[in-house]
Amino acid sequence: MSTHICPKCKNDSFTWVVDEEISSLTIWGCYNCRYEAIEDESLERICSRCGSKSESYLKDQESEYWWCSNCNRITNEKN
């Protein structure tokens, strides 16, 4: 399993696991800063910056945002 740049601490230590009970949910976690977020894979879209279909809608305890795992762009728009 590969790692990605964590949206919180910016280290290459962000990885995921699929929830076995709800197959469309992915749980992301950073093993450096312990940040966790939930992704609903049905909301994936094409990133307007890099053009890759790797932008996911993440939700944590404090916020919801779009995050591109390819270029690490974060946007706070709801749509």
Image (tube, rainbow, N blue to C red):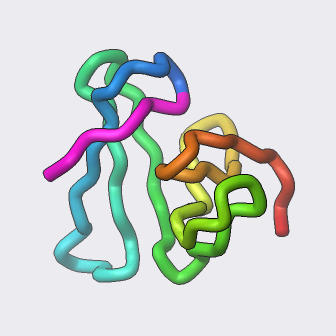
Q: How many numbered discs?
A: 0
Q: Quadrant of the C terminus?
A: bottom right
Residue 6 colored magenta?
Answer: yes
| Most common SS among magenta residues | loop
- Left or right of residue 21: residue 8: right
Q: Is residue 1 above or below residue 21?
A: above
Q: Nearer the viewer, residue 2 or 34?
A: 2
Q: Is residue 39 above or below residue 67?
A: below
Tell me what residue is drawn at x 29 percent, y 28 percent: 13
Residue 67, how many percent across, how many down? Answer: 61, 49
Q: Residue 51 placed where, x, y %?
A: 66, 66
Q: Is residue 51 left or right of residue 31?
A: right
Q: Residue at x 36, y 39 (%)?
A: 4
Q: Quadrant of residue 71?
A: top right
Q: Is residue 25 left or right of residue 76?
A: left
| Residue situated in front as seen by the camera: 39 or 45 | 45
Q: Is 30 rendered above or below residue 63?
A: above
Q: Residue furthest left?
A: 1
Range of the magenta residues? 1-7
Residue at 34% x, 55% y: name it: 27
The percent coordinates of residue 2 (x first, y second) are: 20, 47
Residue 61 x, y percent position in the rendering = 57, 39
Q: Residue furthest front?
A: 50
For image coordinates 22% across by 57% down, the residue present is 17
